[in-house]
Image (cartoon, rainbow, N blue to C red):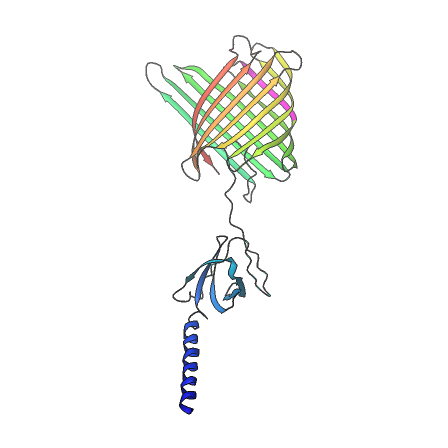
């Protein structure tokens, strides 16, 4: 009888020892838990029950993870050095961390598109609130007919909620066989005031000259209302309507005053990962004379070759049913530039 009791005691001791040996590696072991929502949490196992696993790490302290949230475990061969920060979930999880309030940062979303056209570009988040896009174009030709043309464009945006200011300056000068082929300057400033996240009011003023189109001086002003009809990570669509007054002093010593309605559609599209396309249509029906109007279509393709430099292709079409005398109603311009963003 004594021998049988000793045998039973040794058997029980062997079973308990084996259980302890099997469970010992888990307690205190470094693991990475892969959660079903795609997040990962690292730490050392403190204890484990049928419902949860209790971990501890230097960032969250001691906390529990429900077993139902775990999809896979990854054993860490050796504890990470104390200087290494633990891997923490990047989105909200069901981790319980008693006595510790931790704000878990969400995964950074893909930044909204930032097209070249500042009218469709979100307000810059830089500390200065400024964003500039300076472009240069130089076309030289030495053949039967020699020609050269210089083009400079500056687009600047200053944004500080609820206001945004958009500055646009275009200068072009060119000669063909010594004769003037281009000499124009156009500048504008647009001030927007955000009413709601998708609607705003604005006022646009502009001026300049065009020697080839026989405009000595031009001035315009116009308030209006705009609304953001659609916004995706790769596409933006805005629509604007307002009033426009334009005054032209022409080379034939005449002055033309025009009162119009301004209807504009503004689009920005990220065609590929880098290539962006901007498209704007402005229609100015004359309020004084039915059937008379002005039309401006502008499209830009922009491809960044680095963080600062970009290649740009602009197509601009201007149409006026009442141009200066001996000037074509339509003016189509195609120009390529190298841009610097800062």
Residue at 56% from the left image edge and 18% from the top image edge: 295
Of residues 35 and 218, the one nearer the viewer is 35
Residue in front for this viewpoint, 54 or 316: 54
Does residue 244 appear to the left or right of 304 in the view shown? right
- Using the rendered image of the protein, determine whether residue 119 is visible from the camera's viewpoint: no
* Of the pair 100 and 119, the residue shown nearer to us: 100
Answer above or below: position of 48 versus 248: below
Residue sitting at the far front = 1
Q: Is residue 275 visible?
A: yes
Residue range highlighted in magenta: 214-223
The number of callouts visible is: 0
Quadrant location of the N terminus in the rendered image: bottom left
Residue at the image point whose x is 58% and y is 37% from the top: 158
Q: Where's residue 41, x and y in %?
A: 48, 59
**Residue drawn at (57%, 59%) of the image:** 102
Report whether 222 appears left or right of 275.
right
Residue shown at the point (46%, 30%) measured from the top left: 135
The image quadrant that residue 177 belongs to is: top left
Residue 198: where, in percent of width, then height? 62, 35
Q: Quadrant of residue 293?
A: top right
Residue furthest to the left: 143
- Queried whether the magenta region covers residue 65, the answer comes back as no
Residue 220 drawn in magenta: yes
Residue 311 placed where, x, y %?
42, 31
Q: Is residue 18 left or right of residue 96?
A: left
What main secondary structure does the magenta stretch of the protein show? strand
Q: Residue 68: x, y in percent?
A: 52, 59
């Amino acid at each position: 009888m004594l021998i049988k009791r000793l045998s039973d005691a040794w058997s029980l001791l062997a079973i308990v020892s084996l259980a302890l040996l099997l469970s010992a590696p888990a307690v205190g072991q470094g693991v990475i838990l892969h959660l079903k929502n795609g997040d990962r949490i690292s730490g050392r196992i403190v204890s484990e029950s049928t419902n949860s696993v209790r971990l501890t790490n230097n960032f969250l302290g001691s906390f529990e993870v429900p077993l139902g949230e775990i999809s896979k475990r990854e054993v860490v061969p050796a504890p990470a050095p104390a200087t290494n920060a633990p891997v923490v979930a990047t989105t909200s999880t069901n981790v319980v961390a008693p006595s510790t309030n931790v704000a878990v940062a969400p995964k950074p979303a893909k930044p909204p598109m930032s097209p070249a056209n500042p009218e469709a570009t979100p307000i810059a988040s830089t500390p200065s609130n400024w964003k500039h896009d300076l472009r240069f174009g130089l076309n030289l030709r030495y053949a039967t007919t020699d020609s050269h043309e210089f083009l400079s464009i500056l687009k600047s945006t200053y944004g500080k909620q609820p206001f945004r200011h958009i500055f646009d300056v275009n200068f072009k000068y060119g000669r063909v066989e010594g004769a003037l082929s281009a000499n124009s300057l156009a500048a504008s400033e647009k001030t927007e005031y955000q009413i709601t996240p998708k609607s705003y009011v604005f006022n646009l003023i502009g001026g300049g000259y065009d020697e080839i189109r026989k405009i000595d001086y031009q001035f315009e002003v116009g308030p209006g209302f705009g609304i953001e009809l659609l916004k995706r990570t790769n596409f933006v669509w805005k629509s604007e309507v307002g009033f426009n007054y334009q005054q032209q002093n022409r080379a034939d010593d005449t002055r033309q005053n025009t009162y119009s309605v301004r209807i504009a559609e503004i689009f920005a599209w990220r065609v590929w990962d880098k290539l962006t396309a901007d498209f704007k249509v402005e229609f100015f029906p004359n309020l004084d004379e039915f059937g008379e109007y002005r039309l401006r279509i502008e499209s830009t393709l922009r491809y960044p070759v680095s963080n600062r430099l970009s290649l740009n292709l602009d197509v601009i079409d201007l149409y006026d049913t009442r141009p200066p005398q001996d000037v074509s109603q339509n003016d189509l311009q195609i120009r390529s530039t190298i841009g610097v963003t800062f």
